[in-house]
Image: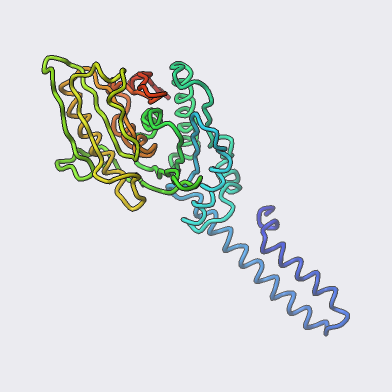
């Protein structure tokens, strides 16, 4: 009843009726009475329809939940969260998403923003951060009885994105990528099923080439170029590798919004899945958007001991293996 009485339509109707009451001395009383009744019924009807529609939306499957994860960046997650909420409201024709998530699901903003400001090379700290995210999101899923779909804006380390992606080994996820020309995040991929793990037979997004100099070496370097940045193969940390598999995106520069971002991830996963059957040690050096890293991480999960590198001052620092993060919740 409190929700009904506080509804904007009821409040507006009461204000109109009050104003009409003040005009009663100048207008025929019966007319005022009749108009007041009409206004009251209209207000009640609109409020009831609005609340009914709202409640129906928040008891359905796949309720959209904004989620921002920030790693090693100075950009405010609050601003990005606000923009993400606005985009979701526009996409689903909603209003007051944040307030309604609190009202119907008891989910508040503080539970949907995760920030890591520490050293990404501090392995134990980074792993704890990812485990905390996994625990919190799993708790939200359980409380909502699995009826929510996360809308994820992650930035800004793709290497950590592989690890973040392992958390989201599920069907319902919408991924947003930072626009290179602004601070806005654009929707680039909607995960509806496990298609992101499907092996491809033909490569259309990448040109795959290989340099195998030692067939007895069980170590291989995989370089992935899917952005305007090049892989610095001359770096001293990469020179020891004798076997190198190269994935070079067929596009030049930034991947456009209208492309199939999931297909990029599928082609990368196809290569890695094949290599893990042949090589004991796989290392990745990459230049790619965070969203592609998220999708590849989802496909790989945490089963493969793939060594991740982070480009830092002209070198590729080997800092963590994908199977080192275990989230048992």
Query: Which color scheme did the rendering employ for the protein?
Result: rainbow
The quarter holding residue 195 reads top left
The location of residue 38, given as percent across then percent down, is 69, 76
Residue sitting at the far left: 215
Which of 260 and 315 lies nearest the eye of the viewer? 315
In percent of the image, x 54 and y 53: which residue is there? 55
Q: Is residue 272 above or below residue 250?
A: above
- Give the number of callouts: 0
Residue 25: % across, % down: 88, 80
Query: Quadrant location of the N terminus?
Result: bottom right
Q: In the figure, is residue 195 to the left or right of 294?
A: left
Q: Between 250 and 82, which is closer to the camera in this rendering?
A: 250
Q: x%, y% of residue 62?
A: 43, 47
Horizontal relation, residue 123 to residue 306: left or right: right
Q: Nearer the viewer, residue 84 or 103?
A: 84
| Above or below, 72 relative to 6 | above
- Which residue appears farthest toward the bottom when viewing the image? 28
Residue 121 in picture, x, y percent from top left: 44, 18
> Which residue appears at 53% of the width and 59% of the height?
53
Most foreground residue, 239 or 146: 239
Can you say which quadrant of the picture contains the C terminus?
top left
State the residue at coordinates (20%, 24%): 276
Q: Is residue 145 left or right of residue 106?
A: left
Q: Is residue 8 left or right of residue 82?
A: right
> Farthest residue toward the front?
234
């Amino acid at each position: 009843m409190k929700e009904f009485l506080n509804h904007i339509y009821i409040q507006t109707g009461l204000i109109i009726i009050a104003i009409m009451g003040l005009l009663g001395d100048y207008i025929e009383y019966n007319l005022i009475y009749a108009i007041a009744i009409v206004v009251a019924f209209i207000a009640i009807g609109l409020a009831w329809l609005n609340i009914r529609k709202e409640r129906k939306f928040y008891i359905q499957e796949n309720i959209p939940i904004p989620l921002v994860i920030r790693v090693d960046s100075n950009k405010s997650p609050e601003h990005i969260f606000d923009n993400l909420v606005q985009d979701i409201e526009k996409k689903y024709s909603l209003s007051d998403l944040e307030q309604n998530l609190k009202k119907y699901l008891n989910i508040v903003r503080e539970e949907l923003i995760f920030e890591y400001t520490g050293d990404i090379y501090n392995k134990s700290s980074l792993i704890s951060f990812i485990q905390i995210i996994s625990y919190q999101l799993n708790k939200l899923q359980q409380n909502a009885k699995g009826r929510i779909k996360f809308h994820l804006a992650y930035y800004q380390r793709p290497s950590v994105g592989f690890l973040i992606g392992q958390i989201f080994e599920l069907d319902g996820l919408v991924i947003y990528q930072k626009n290179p020309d602004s601070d806005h995040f654009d929707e680039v991929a909607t995960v509806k099923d496990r298609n992101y793990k499907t092996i491809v037979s033909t490569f259309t997004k990448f040109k795959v080439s290989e340099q195998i100099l030692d067939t007895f070496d069980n170590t291989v370097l995989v370089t992935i170029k899917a952005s305007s940045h090049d892989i610095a193969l001359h770096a001293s940390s990469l020179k020891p590798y004798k076997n190198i598999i190269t994935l070079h995106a067929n596009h030049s520069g930034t991947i456009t919004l209208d492309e199939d971002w999931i297909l990029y991830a599928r082609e990368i996963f196809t290569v890695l899945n094949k290599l893990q059957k042949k090589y004991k040690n796989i290392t990745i050096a990459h230049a790619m958007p965070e969203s592609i890293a998220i999708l590849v991480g989802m496909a790989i999960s945490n089963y493969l001991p793939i060594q991740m590198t982070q480009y830092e001052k002209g070198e590729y620092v080997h800092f963590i293996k994908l199977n080192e993060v275990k989230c048992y919740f």
